[in-house]
């Protein structure tokens, strides 16, 4: 019997380890530590030579990953989301943003890329997925889904699971012009007059703050400071607190609402964001107000502030935007306001009297 067979026979009889391997029930197992120092035991093969080869390949991958600065080279998108990404980022999201983000991950990103290894995703894979989605949904929806994928991949880079994000070279999705919808004074009055009692407070506060549905649904009395005339939204869509000074109309409206002793009680009647949308849709249909959505009340606030001469930076802060381009999409000016602006040309251009030419002979 040669030396190799003798060595394997001794190892088998003793049931001991050999070069990162051990034998159990006639099978060889791998026994190793990954780049993070975590111990693993993995069933390998019935024969020593195959198991030894598998062990060497495993250690080579670990060493390669450590050399390249990559923690787990073979991790899939599905496992990365389950074990690393979602547990880390979900606490920084508002309830509604977390629900939407989880839906995007489960219904679109994981169904497409879940079985991909993070290191194997290519830019062309994402381009193809984007093109398929553009055929089915609006550009804004594709943009939201792509932003979530980009964030996932950027986290993978920052946490050293991949060296570079394959979404880095993606072309920007061309967005259509923002919706041009603002309300006339008659429309505002009609909405408040005809809205059912549980929906009217949502419309009133939305028209006075430009707040989103989710922010209104989660507004509590502890976020209302009647002493300083300030309304606070502690966890907004972008994860940051936003404080808005009350208008006199809003202050008077809140004064007439019943205020319970429990500061954690909700300010507005218990409606979900979807119930607000459905109720508002039925209202505008009954009132025959075409192409009007609840989110357009936010547009109306931005447009009204802009036409009053409020600086863009201030409008950004009131709406809770970080990107000025987003605020610009909300700022629609009425034709009457544009005509009034153009009239300033005449008032600012005073005619200058023609100067008489000097008399005299020319040489």
Image: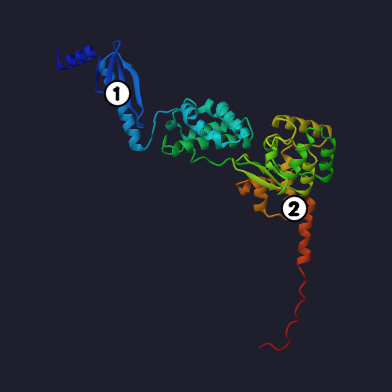
Q: Is 117 left or right of 63, judged from the image as shown?
A: right
Q: Which residue is mark 2?
A: 307
| Location of residue 117 in the rendering, given as x and y in whole percent from the top left corner | 44, 28
Q: Secondary structure at mark 1?
A: helix
Residue reaching furthest top?
25
Q: Quadrant of residue 236?
A: top right
User: Quick one: 271 or 112, which is closer to the camera?
Assistant: 271
Residue 198 visible? The answer is: yes
Residue 177 visible? The answer is: no
Closer to the N terminus: mark 2 or mark 1? 1
Q: Secondary structure at mark 2?
A: helix
Q: Which residue is mark 1?
A: 55
> Which residue is depicted at the point 78% across and 53% down?
337
| Location of residue 286 in the rendering, given as x and y in whole percent from the top left corner | 83, 32
Distance between mark 2 and mark 1 Cα atoms:
70 Å
| Location of residue 344 in the rendering, given as x and y in whole percent from the top left corner | 77, 62
Using the image, tell me which numbered label, if any, was put on residue 121: none
Q: Is residue 9 above or below residue 342?
A: above
> Which residue is depicted at the point 25% across and 14% down?
15
In the rendered view of the protein, which quadrant contains the C terminus?
A: bottom right
Q: Quadrant of residue 74?
A: top left
């Amino acid at each position: 019997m040669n030396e190799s067979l003798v060595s394997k026979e001794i190892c088998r009889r003793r049931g001991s380890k050999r070069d990162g391997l051990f034998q159990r029930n006639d099978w060889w197992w791998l026994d190793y530590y990954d780049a993070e120092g975590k111990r693993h035991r993995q069933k390998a093969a019935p024969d020593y030579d195959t198991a030894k080869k598998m062990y060497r390949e495993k250690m080579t991958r670990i060493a390669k990953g450590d050399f390249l600065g990559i923690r787990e080279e073979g991790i899939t998108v599905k496992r990365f989301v389950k074990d690393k990404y979602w547990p880390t980022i979900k606490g920084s999201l508002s309830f509604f943003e977390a629900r939407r983000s989880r839906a995007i991950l489960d219904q679109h990103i994981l169904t497409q890329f879940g079985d991909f290894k993070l290191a194997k995703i290519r830019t062309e894979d994402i381009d193809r997925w984007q093109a398929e989605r553009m055929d089915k949904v609006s550009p804004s929806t594709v943009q939201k889904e792509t932003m979530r994928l980009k964030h996932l991949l950027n986290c993978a880079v920052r946490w050293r699971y991949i060296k570079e994000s394959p979404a880095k070279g993606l072309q920007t999705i061309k967005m259509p012009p923002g919706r041009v919808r603002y309300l006339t004074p008659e429309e505002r009055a009609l909405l408040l007059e005809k809205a059912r009692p549980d929906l009217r407070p949502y419309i009133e506060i939305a028209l006075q703050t430009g707040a989103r549905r989710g922010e209104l649904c989660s507004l509590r009395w502890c976020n209302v400071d009647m002493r300083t005339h300030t309304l606070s939204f502690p966890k907004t869509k972008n994860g940051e607190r936003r404080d808005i000074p009350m208008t006199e109309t809003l202050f008077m409206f809140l004064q007439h609402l019943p205020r319970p002793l429990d500061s954690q009680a909700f300010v507005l009647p218990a409606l979900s964001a979807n119930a607000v949308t459905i109720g508002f849709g039925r209202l505008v249909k009954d009132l025959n107000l075409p192409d009007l959505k609840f989110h357009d009340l936010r547009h109306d606030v931005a447009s009204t502030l802009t036409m009053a001469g409020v600086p863009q930076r201030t409008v950004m802060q009131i709406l809770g935007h970080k990107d000025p381009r987003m605020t610009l999409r909300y700022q629609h000016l009425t034709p009457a306001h544009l005509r009034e602006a153009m009239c300033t040309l005449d008032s600012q251009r005073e005619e200058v009297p023609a100067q008489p030419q000097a008399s005299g002979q020319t040489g």
